[in-house]
Image: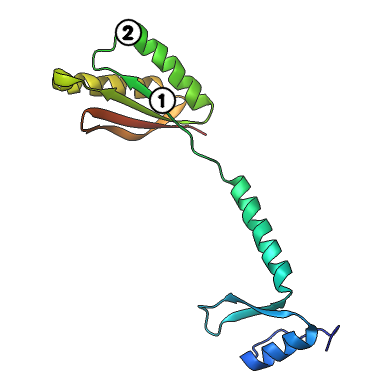
Amino acid sequence: MVGENVEIGVYSKSKALIIADDLGLDLVEISPKANPPVCKIVDYKKFLYEQKKREKVLKAKTTKVVIKEIRFGPQTDNHDYEFKKKHSEKFLREGAKLKAFVFFKGRSIIYKDQGEILLLRLAQDLEEIGKVEQMPKLEGKRMIMFIAPKK
C-alpha cells in the first residue's frame, strides 16, 4: 500500500494499525476523549518535531508581564509625589504594570484615608495612559492599587 492514498474515514483500531504499518508510518492518537477517538497516520518523530515547533512559536508570542512598584508614605509631600508620578508614567509607557502602594509604619495606620486619597489622585493623574485594575485595598500595613497600561 506504500505510495497509495488512504481513504479518509472511520476504521477499526486493528485496520488503522495495519494501514499505518503498511505505509511504514505510525498511528498517532490526536483526540483520545472523542467518541470514536481521532487518530492520524503520520511519522511520529516528525509529528513531535512540528508540535514542539508550534509550542515554541506560541511561547515566543506570549508577552511577559513586568510589574513595577512605586512606594508612597501616607504623608508624601507634593514634590516627591510628582517625582514618583513621572516614574509611574515612564513605567506605563514602557508597557509594565504598576503596583502603587502606601506603606504605613507604626501608628501611621490612622492616616489610611490619606493613603487612599493619594492613590486615587495617582490613578486620576495617570488615567490617560493607564487604567486601574484594582482599586486601593488595605492589606496589613499596605494599601495597594494596580494600574495597567492602556493599549
Please tell me how many numbered marks the rendered image carries: 2
Is 134 drawn above or below residue 15 in the view shown?
above
| Amino acid residing under circle 1 | Glu
Is 45 drawn above or below residue 127 in the view shown?
below
Q: Name the residue under label 1.
A: 127
Is 114 drawn above or below residue 97 in the view shown?
above
Question: Residue 37 is drawn in which quadrant?
Answer: bottom right
Side (left or right) of 43 relative to 143: right
Q: What element carries label 2?
A: helix
Q: Are marks 1 and 2 in contact (CB under 8 Å)?
A: no
Residue closer to the observer: 29 or 90? 29
Is 43 drawn above or below residue 11 in the view shown?
above
User: Looking at the picture, how far across and down is residue 97, in whole percent?
Assistant: 44, 32
Q: Which residue is drawn at 17% across and 18% down?
A: 108
Q: Estimate how packed mark 2 is, as few (under 14), some (14 to 19) or many (20 or more) residues with alpha carbons within 10 Å.
A: few
CA–CA distance in space, label 1 to label 2: 19 Å
Q: Which mark is residue 78?
A: 2
Residue closer to the observer: 136 or 139? 139
Residue closer to the observer: 93 or 21? 21
Question: Residue 83 is drawn in which quadrant?
Answer: top left
Q: Residue at x 38, y 19 (%)?
A: 125
Q: Can residue 139 be seen in this view?
A: yes
User: Looking at the picture, how far across and down is residue 20, in whole percent?
Assistant: 73, 85
User: Looking at the picture, how far across and down is residue 82, in whole percent?
Assistant: 39, 11
| Amino acid residing under circle 2 | Asn
Q: Which of marks 1 and 2 is nearer the N terminus?
A: 2
Point out the frontmost of discs 1 and 2.
2
